[in-house]
Amino acid sequence: MILSGKGGTGKSVVGTALAVAASERGQRVLLVEIDAPLEASRYLGAAPVGTREAEVRPGLFAVNLDPTAVMDEYVRGVVRVEMLARRVLQSPVYRRFFAAAPGLPELMVLGKIMVLEEARASRFSSRPRYDLIVVDAPATGHGLSFLQVPLAASRAVPVGPIGHNARRILALLQDADRTALVIVAIPEEMAVVEAQELRRAAVDELGITPTALVLNQCHERRFTREQEAEILRLAAEGAPGRLARGVGLRSALAAARRHLRRRKLTRFYQARLRRALPLPTVSLPYLFDEDIGPASIERLARRLEAA
Amino acid sequence: MRPAGADRASRALAAALGERRVLVVCGSGGVGKTTTAAALALQAALEGRQVLVCTIDPARRLATSLGLASLEGRPRRLDLSRVAPRAAGALWAMTLDTRRTFDALVEKHASSEAARRRILDNRFYQQVSSALAGSHEYMAMEKLLELSADERFDLVVLDTPPTRHALDFLEAPDRLMGFLDTSVLKWFLKPYFVAGRLTLKVATRTGAFALELADRFLGLQFLQDLSEFFLAFEGMYAGFKERAEKVHALLRGEDSGFVLVAGPARTTLDEARYFYRRLREKDMPFVGLVVNRVHPDPLAEAGPAPRRSAAIDPELARGLLRLMEDQARVARRERRGIARLEADVTEPLILVPELDADVHDLRGLAEIGEMVLGGGRVRARRGPRKAELHAPARR
């Protein structure tokens, strides 16, 4: 399951919640972050995750794929003799080539994800090591080029190990039985535009049909219709006085009107996405927690579970 | 809302907008970077400068915030008459077309028509130049160099790609320079790659070893393609390297400035802090840090509890209080993150409150610009460039 969307849509939070929800259902889940060692583990209150898979909760593993480390591991796997491998890894030609070659880091990371997807539980088992792998992809703009890399690489280098692997990765991404692309958006103009653009490009350019849309940070109804009308009426009157905690009624009404406007935007974009993106959609609430921690993730996971 | 020193920070940013020639707006994705870039560019244009704002984002975000369906790969002048009928300056906007920029670069530096065709027809080039991540950064710096020399504009505001680590952009010139710096290229330009058919019979044992390894994890065909690709560029490397060096110098010059943009979420604040440190380490001219979309604390001005509460429905009153407590918690969460950032950044931050509505037209951009600049006013520098400028936000 690959999560993609504009930066700032809370992909990491959503990805972590999805992974938690699946692991609570008894699945063995791997949460993959790319070059971001802190986020998921912070939300789960675990120690920072390194470049090796680590169990952060029962049944939930996490890994941070750092492209350089993945490439080094690949070289070690190919060369096998540590001394020779080290010679390659330490050569400035290798380092500079890897740093400057466009697309190579992305291809390496996707290749590693493919390897993880194909991994078995043990040498003699046909059971997959992970029932579900959740990938927190880089933000769109770059997220799309991230997914475009296998296609571009298979065209640029049709033969040889790179082309071969690029085609295998592409086949994995396009296989709806093995890969689900989930678009993450929030109820805001730019994020919604990007979600639409992402779906179009995924379908038209990459041959990948997104599976679902998660609309994160939705402002949900907190007042009844009558209360909402009352808020607007009181606000128009400029009602004086204070509420229990010494809060001015006027500033309370201003806060409530802010909420109503946000709520209206949420509904507006929900409707627009329903029309523009014919995808199963899950709406997740905006989090008012003082700390985005395990409790927040649990709450989102339960919402995802219910959906 | 505005912390102590914010006016000073806003004035420094306004001064940079009035005087510098290049402003690079950096930050992680989703923090309102494009909007901030466009809003600042608009402010400078309203005050009399000839401004170009260039976005590199393939998702065409700037187009949305400028109320245009799409932006072209060429600068397009915007009609400012609706926001300011008597605007003293002018504003152009464009998005970077990575492929076209790359092609133009090849056209400019190719020694002959044959050399030009050889590159443009190269399969590897066709993919690298348009599709691959990483090309955007290289071409962004190429375009920046070109635009900064364009006579029409006296300020170029560059919105950078939404990389997770926005540093990729800053490091692109160095990476390219490292790559073009002989050793890697020499290796690829060795004769055994190019003699038509590839052979493993190479002169030295080391060469054979390196080649065998490369074959195993990259494939000889790939290396051969790559080598042909590099050979096609032969004669152009000096030109490329010179361009990379020029960008390197341009970005460190006193005519340039970096504006960092962050959002109130902890991740983006942490990234801004990291970015700020790297800017300082690399001696890049920092001109301001904007934190967008900060939520106000509605309980901040709460007084003592009244003896008698306002006469409204108690159920509604409880709902209102719950809402305000929720909003206050968000404000506290954000304030903690901002305080961590403040501890590391010597200059005051510019905090911009969350707006009630999305911004997607020029009028909205003008309002945001005013909010960012606060008390600071852009004083446009006109006439010939002065060699010596004062650099307001530098220590």
Image: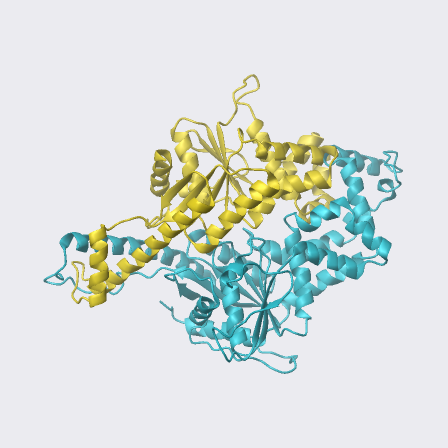
Chain colours: A yellow, B cyan
- Of B315 and A300, nearer the camera is B315
Front position in the image: B15 or B221: B221
Please give the name of the residue rendered at 52% of the width and 24% of the height, measured from the top-left corner. Answer: A128
Depth check: give the residue in front, A14 or B274: A14
Foreground of the two, A275 or A70: A275
Residue extending farthest left: B307
Q: Position of residue B1 (x, y in %)?
A: 35, 67
The residue most toward the bottom is B383
**Quarter in which the C terminus of chain A is drawn:** top left
Residue B245 drawn at (x, y percent): 72, 62
Q: Does A127 sit left or right of A95 as displayed? A: left
Q: Position of residue B53 (x, y in %)?
A: 58, 66
* Residue B20 relative to residue A82: left or right: left
Q: Give the image quarter of residue B390.
A: bottom right
Number of callouts in the render? 0
> What residue is drawn where x is 59% and y is 30%?
A115
Residue B262 horizontal side relative to residue A288, left or right: right
Taking A160 as reference, is A262 above or below it?
below
Whether residue A51 is visible, yes or no, is: yes
Q: Quadrant of residue B236?
A: bottom right
Q: Is residue B46 above or below residue A32?
A: below
- Seen at 65% across and 79% down, the residue is B385
